[in-house]
């Protein structure tokens, strides 16, 4: 899906790189939307929160701030803990997705220039 050029291939043009970053951002936004929906659904069904309150709590946990409303049930507390763990891992994965193409571009340009000098 987000394949990178090989070591001997010419680095991607600036326009191509911007398109790659736009696709990466689109994937991240979809993942954020799915993650937010999972949290909202859990808070709505388990803690019986209205949708707006479920959105607020899910977005605060997903953003790393923590829940706004205290959980009333044991099931809600377990869900909030699991969702917080999931959110932390999702954040790391999305950061890797975002910075992967940038790191690849820097390293590829370095190695591509090195290969040209060797030949």
Image: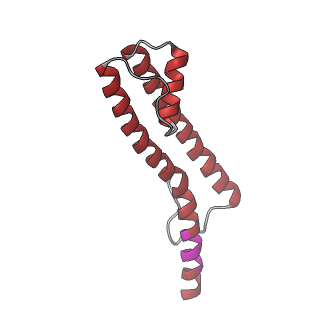
Judge whether residue 119 can be spotted in this image: no
Depicted 103 relative to depicted 16: above or below: below
Image colouring? secondary structure
Q: Quadrant of residue 9?
A: bottom right
Q: Does the magenta segment cover residue 98?
A: no
Provide residue 82's location: percent of width, then percent of height. Answer: 34, 33
Depicted 39 relative to depicted 25: above or below: above
Give 106 or 12, whichever is nearer the viewer.
106
Depicted 3 relative to depicted 104: above or below: above
Q: Does the magenta segment cover residue 109?
A: yes
Provide residue 72's location: percent of width, then percent of height. Answer: 36, 17
Q: Which quadrant of the rendered structure holds the C terminus?
A: bottom right
**Furthest residue toward right:** 15
Give 92 or 14, whichever is nearer the viewer.
92
**Left or right of residue 38: residue 115:** right
Query: Which residue is pictured at 53% across the width and 63% down the height?
Result: 104
Query: Which residue is pictured at 45% across the width and 48% down the height?
Result: 92
Magenta range is 107-113
Q: Quadrant of residue 77?
A: top left
Query: Which residue is pictured at 51% across the width and 37% down the height?
Result: 65
What's the magenta bit mostly, secondary-structure-wise? helix
Tally the numbered discs: 0
Judge whether residue 63 can be spotted in this image: yes
**Furthest residue toward bottom:** 118
Provide residue 45's location: percent of width, then percent of height. Answer: 39, 14
Provide residue 95's location: percent of width, then percent of height. Answer: 50, 50
Query: Which residue is pictured at 64% across the width and 56% down the height?
Result: 17
């Amino acid at each position: 899906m987000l394949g990178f050029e090989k070591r001997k291939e010419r680095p991607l043009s600036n326009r191509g790189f911007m398109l790659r970053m736009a696709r990466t951002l689109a994937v991240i936004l979809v993942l954020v939307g799915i993650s937010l929906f999972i949290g909202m659904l859990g808070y709505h069904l388990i803690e019986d929160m209205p949708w707006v309150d479920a959105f607020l709590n899910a977005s605060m946990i997903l953003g790393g701030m923590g829940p706004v409303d205290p959980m009333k049930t044991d099931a809600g507390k377990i869900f909030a803990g699991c969702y917080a763990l999931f959110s932390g891992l999702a954040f790391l994965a999305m950061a890797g997705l975002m910075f992967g193409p940038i790191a690849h571009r820097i390293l590829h340009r370095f190695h591509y220039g090195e290969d040209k000098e060797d030949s």
